[in-house]
Amino acid sequence: MNEVMKVLTIIATVFIPITFVAEIYGMNFKYMPELDWKWRYLAVWGLISVITLGMIGYFKRKKWI
């Protein structure tokens, strides 16, 4: 039971920041500077990837995964 709770906590912890970024960019903003960037889509995916890989790396360093 304890191992299952640890795995579920790690999964939730990884997805919470990704959900936050998706919520921000899912809103209908009229004036958001990065909406005019040519590479905005890739920049957001890059941000999501960095957050995810950083958190997974942190958990592996702590030997939680």
Image: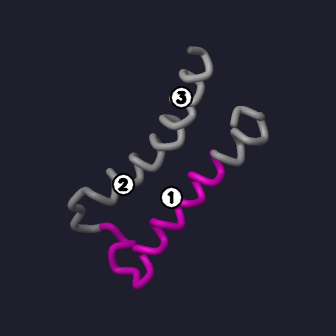
Inter-mark Cα distance, 1 to 3: 19 Å
Identify the element where label 2 is drawn. Answer: helix
Q: Which residue in the rendered view is the most extreme toward the bottom?
A: 38
Among the 4 quarters of the image, the one containing residue 33: bottom left
Look at the image and tell me in which quarter the C terminus lies: top right
- Packing grade of label 3 (10 A; few <14, some 14-19, many >=20) is few
11 in relation to 52, above or below: above
Identify the element where label 1 is drawn. Answer: helix
Q: How many marks?
A: 3
Find out whether the residues at labels 2 and 1 contact each other: C-beta distance under 8 Å: yes
- The residue beneath circle 3 is 9
Principal secondary structure, stretch drawn in magenta:
helix
List x then y, in percent, for residue 3.
Answer: 62, 21
In the image, 7: left or right of 37? Answer: right
Q: Is residue 9 magenta?
A: no
List x then y, in percent, for residue 16.
Answer: 45, 40
Identify the element where label 3 is drawn. Answer: helix
Look at the image and tell me in which quarter the N terminus lies: top right
In the image, 30: left or right of 22? Answer: left
- Packing grade of label 1 (10 A; few <14, some 14-19, many >=20) is some
In the image, 26: left or right of 48? Answer: left
Among the 4 quarters of the image, the one containing residue 27: bottom left
For marks 2 and 1 on the same chain, the one whose residue lies earlier in the sequence: 2
For marks 1 and 3 on the same chain, the one whose residue lies earlier in the sequence: 3
